[in-house]
Image (tube, grey):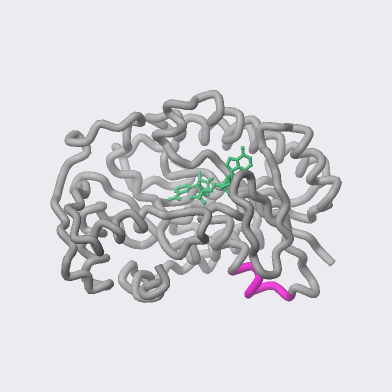
Amino acid sequence: MKTVLVTGASGFLGWNFCKLARKNWQLSDVRISGTYYTHALDIKGVDMIRLDLTDERSIREIFETVRPNAVVHTAAVSSPNFCQTHPDLSYAVNVTASVTLATICCDRSIPFIFTSSEQVFDGERSPYTETDAVCPINLYGEHKAIAEREILQRYPIATVCRMPLMFGCVPPTASSFIQPFLSAMRDGRELKLFVDEFRTPVSGETAAKGLLIALDTGMSILHLGGRERISRYEFGLLLKEVFQLERARIEPCRQADVKMAAPRPRDVALDSSKAYALGYNPPSLKTALLEIRGKV
Ligand SMILES: NC(=O)c1ccc[n+]([C@@H]2O[C@H](COP(=O)([O-])OP(=O)(O)OC[C@H]3O[C@@H](n4cnc5c(N)ncnc54)[C@H](OP(=O)(O)O)[C@@H]3O)[C@@H](O)[C@H]2O)c1
């Protein structure tokens, strides 16, 4: 029996990945071990273990306990604003721990998937392909870019998946960007959304399908963006329409109107044609939202 270790299973993407893997894999053939850090969570069919990525001994121990045949690394300090104000923690988790995991996977010759971000780019020359040079404008993106480089230097057959903005169903321990949107819209509170910030979002389930493809195909760098480039404002209007939220009050605003700790790239749309050619097939945003309506 094979064992796949999923770090960050209590987080948004790790949880979506575990749910999809549990559906797709025969549990008699593959055991799924998932990690949490501060949010203990039960996921049916997944063995959950606590892991502190800032503690190298804890990382090494988990390999001895779980003896994985592959690692999908979704754990991260994932908020750009938090990373900007906590640079040491961001570096420890997003760079040091990720490189340690990759090095151990290299020593054991097992597949390693690292989840990076669209924010390794500056947002001025989209859409970005896998061969474009990275040029981050905030610490989160900078740390992801350093991790990507060091991981691939140490373990050239590791896979770096650059994830886009993601939305969808969440466990009680995590969130995605639409949950606060929905809460404001349902309450009839004003929601100001950027008209000048563009992304190529996908649902957590679609992203998880992309990670499965990455695990199967073993590409070096793979963009897992959606097919539609959309602003937050346009996304909000689509959400209002699909979820039939009559009370929603969406107002346009610009990035420059809101002061945040981390600079925000303007347009980090990903060109994901390489993944599409491998069978990654994100549905339209409308279809993806219809699929999660009533579940979020
Ligand atoms: N969400 C997006 O839109 C988006 C966009 C682009 C890229 N990404 C990338 O995609 C991946 C998944 O993101 P996500 O949204 O699922 O993140 P998330 O919901 O914030 O989950 C983060 C996970 O990391 C774990 N974690 C945090 N600090 C840890 C530590 N010191 N030791 C061990 N585990 C720790 C958390 O555990 P606890 O909660 O149990 O503490 C949680 O399971 C990340 O690499 C992120 O950078 C996300």
Residue 159 visible in the current orientation:
no
In the image, residue 77 above or below residue 284: above
In the image, residue 47 above or below residue 295: above
Q: Please say whether residue 196 is one of the residues in the magenta stretch.
A: no
Point out the residue furthest to the front here. 187
Question: Which stretch is magenta?
Answer: 20-26
- Tell me the quadrant of the picture where the C terminus can be found: bottom left
- The residue at 40%/52% (across/down) is 165
In the rendered image, residue 121, in percent from the top left (x then y), is placed at 40, 37
In the image, residue 241 above or below residue 130: below
Taking depth in this image into account, of 60 and 44 the one nearest to the observer is: 44
Taking depth in this image into account, of 122 and 244 the one nearest to the observer is: 244
- The residue at 21%/49% (across/down) is 193
Taking depth in this image into account, of 166 and 130 the one nearest to the observer is: 166
- The residue at 19%/55% (across/down) is 189
- The residue at 66%/70% (across/down) is 22
In the rendered image, residue 270, in percent from the top left (x then y), is placed at 39, 50
Side of 32 where 279 appears, left or right: left
In the rendered image, residue 84, in percent from the top left (x then y), is placed at 42, 28
Residue 215 is drawn in which quadrant? Answer: bottom right
Examine the residues drawn in magenta and state their main secondary structure: helix
Q: Please say whether residue 24 is one of the residues in the magenta stretch.
A: yes
- Tell me the quadrant of the picture where the N terminus can be found: bottom right
Taking depth in this image into account, of 131 and 51 the one nearest to the observer is: 51
Side of 126 where 206 appears, left or right: right
Side of 217 where 293 appears, left or right: left
